[in-house]
Image: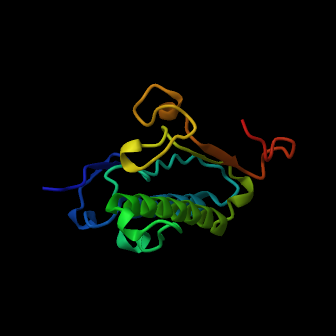
Amino acid sequence: DKYLDLQDGDNLVTDKNELAMHNSYLFGQKVEGFISDHHKAYGSDTPFFLYYAMQMVHSPVSAPDIYRDRCHTPSGVDDDETDDLNWNYCGLNVMLDEAVANLTCVLDSYGYTDNTILILASDNGGDSSAIGSSYPFRGSKGSPWNGGVAATAFIHSPLIASKRQGKSY
């Protein structure tokens, strides 16, 4: 029957009106509401911890048209060679970029930018069944090889000592 089965604190969320909403929008609204509520209650000087588990890029590999339309066929590749999976995968990556941008804008608008540590990390390597790649590593999502477990991440904060900024680990 396609219904939501999510927890929001102690409350079960099953609002069928949100079914047409991509979960990225739903979670983005919840995050913005959390940050806004925290700011109203405590101001921008009181720290908080927020774990925001974005689910992009993830199966099912299906992106709204507005994001798919922002993807272009690479030069030298015939449109006929690209399939629906490629467009959806690209669209979800664009959607992920926008969700991160929205988060940073919300943090900035409430005055948290200068005292925030932002950590972005993937939970696994690329999904080769959905055109993902973990190159140059062997394997992909679901495998025990580096391609399945090594993942990209970055940390950004003005609170990081300047001698540590710009380093790769």
Seen in the picture, residue 138 relative to 153 is either above or below; the reply is above
In the image shown, does 62 or 38 lie closer to the viewer?
62
Seen in the picture, residue 145 relative to 153 is either above or below; the reply is above
In the image shown, does 14 or 10 lie closer to the viewer?
14
In the image, residue 153 lies at what x, y percent? 61, 43
Residue at screen point 64% across, 69% down: 109
Residue 18 quadrant:
bottom left
In the image, residue 58 lies at what x, y percent? 39, 49
Q: Is residue 162 visible?
A: yes
In the image, residue 55 lies at what x, y percent? 42, 51
Number of numbered discs: 0
Q: Residue furthest top?
A: 144
| Quarter occupied by the C terminus | top right
In the image, residue 17 lies at what x, y percent? 24, 67
Residue 65 quadrant:
bottom left
User: Is 119 positioned to the left or the right of 30 in the image?
Assistant: right
> How did the renderer colour the structure?
rainbow
